[in-house]
Amino acid sequence: MNPVMKTSPGRTRRRRNHQALRAAHTVTCPNCGATKRPHHACSSCGYVRPGLQLKGFQANA
């Protein structure tokens, strides 16, 4: 079977409007000041929350 009507450009765009990429939200690390994702360990110092830091953390430098 073939489609009865052509899909209009507006309908195609409305269907695809949620597929756009969004910028990642970042916050500053209170320990070293580098940017990090919220609720994740800092990639430069290993800081997670007050009193907790990743053991044996090595920076990717």
Image (cartoon, rainbow, N blue to C red):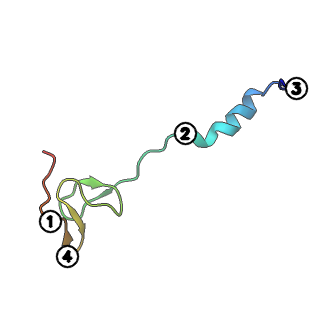
Label 4, secondary structure: give it.
loop
User: Residue 7: x and y, percent?
Assistant: 78, 28
Kindly indicate whether the residue at mark 4 contacts the one at mark 1 (C-beta within 8 angstroms). no
Q: Amino acid at mark 2?
A: Ala
User: Residue 45: x and y, percent?
Assistant: 17, 58
Q: Which residue is mark 4?
A: 51
Q: How far apart are labels 3 and 2 at the CA level?
A: 29 Å
Q: Vertically, is 33 above or below 20?
A: below
Q: How far apart are labels 4 and 2 at the CA level?
A: 38 Å
Camera-near label (1 vs 4) is: 1
Which mark sits nearer the N-terminus, 3 or 1?
A: 3
Camera-near label (1 vs 2) is: 1
Kindly indicate whether the residue at mark 2 contacts the one at mark 4 (C-beta within 8 angstroms). no
Q: Residue at x 73, y 27 (%)?
A: 9
User: Residue 17: x and y, percent?
Assistant: 63, 39
Q: Vertically, is 36 above or below 2?
A: below
At label 2, counting other C-alpha atoms closer than 10 Å, the crowd grade (few under 14, some 14-19, many 20 or more) is few
Q: Amino acid at mark 1?
A: Lys
Kindly indicate whether the residue at mark 3 contacts the one at mark 4 (C-beta within 8 angstroms). no
Q: Which mark is residue 55?
A: 1
Label 1, secondary structure: give it.
loop
At label 3, counting other C-alpha atoms closer than 10 Å, the crowd grade (few under 14, some 14-19, many 20 or more) is few
Q: Amino acid at mark 4?
A: Gly
At label 1, counting other C-alpha atoms closer than 10 Å, the crowd grade (few under 14, some 14-19, many 20 or more) is few
Camera-near label (3 vs 2) is: 3
Question: Tag count in the figure?
Answer: 4
Which mark sits nearer the N-terminus, 1 or 2?
A: 2
Q: Which mark is residue 4?
A: 3
Query: Which quadrant is home to the N terminus?
Result: top right
Q: Which residue is mark 2?
A: 20
Which mark sits nearer the N-terminus, 4 or 2?
A: 2
